[in-house]
């Protein structure tokens, strides 16, 4: 069985195991369930296909379902848009339609100008396999100075799992790490033969037990918006919201823009950090301010 088909089999089995039978709209069944999730025949019933057909699909057999069947299976497994896209990717497309191998991604000058013009707001540009292609001064101050990393290590997932600083920087590290795994899973499904992506995944699975555990769950997620909770060493606790923009004509490049709520302590913390990046003078570390005046109150 080819690697892509093994991935398909694993994804379908795990997706089936995550569906709550009581919420799937199935007829009453008094049989004892020995494993969580749906049985194969139940997925087939919900998708309107034969049990044998679905079984062969879950085994990773070389069959090509119609778009209607794929949509029905996705509904039966309660997949979201990212999950359905991942399923289509794993089914495979003709070799002539696969994304062609490309070299190192480059950011055009206009995009550098764009993120630099977003003065006071952190902005990142990510490429394939979550490579960090560019970061403005606020992103470098808020997260890390990615430009100081060797080019081959400027990767968001790699930074999240292999840089110990992230575990103290992110108050919600487990949530952010899970999203990084799921985003990378989605990327692998789009281009399973990309050597650089395969090498990255192998390194992370070998060096990070948390990544390896998350990878085995075979969940996918497309980050479009959300929030991150941080404890910055200079300005203390803050929450940033993010929105993502995929650039027209360049689907492999995504802009991440981070903002804070007007009038909040998070906004004040980000403004203080912005002031520091402009003047070059470090604000007093948060822990020293707390030792003198007590904890700040978020309003």
Image (cartoon, rainbow, N blue to C red):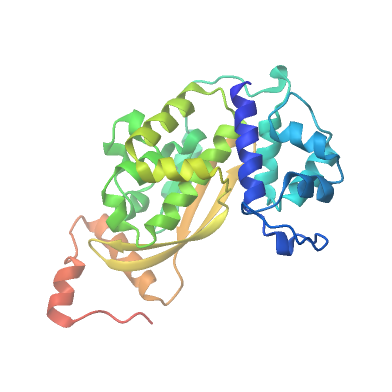
Q: Can residue 245 be spotted in the picture? A: yes
Give x and y (percent) for residue 269: 32, 68
The vertical placement of 174 against 6, above or below, is: below
Residue 40's image quarter?
top right
Give x and y (percent) for residue 105: 48, 28
Which residue is found at the position 23% from the left and 61% from the top?
A: 233
Quadrant placement of the C terminus: bottom left
Which residue is at the front of the view, 112 or 230?
230
Give x and y (percent) for residue 289: 17, 74
Q: Can residue 135 be spotted in the picture? A: no
Residue 2's image quarter?
top right
Which residue is at the front of the view, 152 or 55?
55
Name the side, left or right, on which 41 lies relative to 5: right
Which residue is found at the position 44% from the left and 40% from the top?
A: 112
Which residue is found at the position 35% from the left and 79% from the top?
A: 298
Which residue is at the front of the view, 279 or 196?
196
């Amino acid at each position: 069985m080819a690697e892509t088909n093994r991935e398909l089999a694993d994804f379908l089995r795990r997706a089936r195991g995550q569906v709550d039978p009581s919420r799937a709209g199935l007829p009453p069944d008094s049989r004892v369930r020995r494993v969580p999730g749906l049985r194969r025949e139940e997925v087939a019933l919900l998708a309107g296909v034969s049990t044998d057909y679905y079984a062969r699909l879950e085994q990773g057999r070389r069959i090509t379902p119609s778009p209607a069947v794929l949509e029905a299976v996705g509904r039966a497994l309660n997949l979201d848009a990212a999950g359905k896209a991942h399923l289509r990717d794993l089914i495979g497309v003709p070799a002539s339609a696969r994304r062609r191998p490309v070299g190192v991604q480059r950011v055009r000058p206009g995009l550098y100008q764009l993120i630099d013009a977003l003065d006071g707001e952190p902005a990142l540009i990510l490429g394939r396999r979550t490579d960090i292609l560019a970061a403005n001064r606020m992103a470098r101050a808020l997260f890390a100075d990615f430009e100081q990393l060797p080019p081959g290590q400027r990767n968001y997932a790699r930074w999240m799992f292999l840089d110990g600083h992230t575990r103290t920087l992110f108050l919600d590290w487990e949530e952010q790490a899970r999203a990084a795994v799921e985003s990378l899973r989605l990327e692998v499904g789009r281009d399973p033969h990309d050597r650089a992506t395969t090498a990255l995944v192998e390194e992370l699975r070998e060096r990070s037990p948390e990544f390896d555990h998350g990878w085995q769950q075979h969940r996918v997620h497309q980050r479009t918006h959300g929030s991150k909770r941080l404890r910055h060493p200079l300005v203390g606790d803050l929450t940033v919201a993010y929105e993502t923009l995929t650039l027209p004509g360049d689907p492999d490049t995504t802009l991440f823009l981070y903002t804070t709520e007007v009038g909040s302590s998070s906004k004040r913390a980000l403004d203080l950090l912005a002031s520091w990046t402009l003047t070059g003078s470090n604000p007093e570390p948060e822990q020293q301010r707390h030792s003198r005046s007590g904890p700040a109150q978020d309003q």
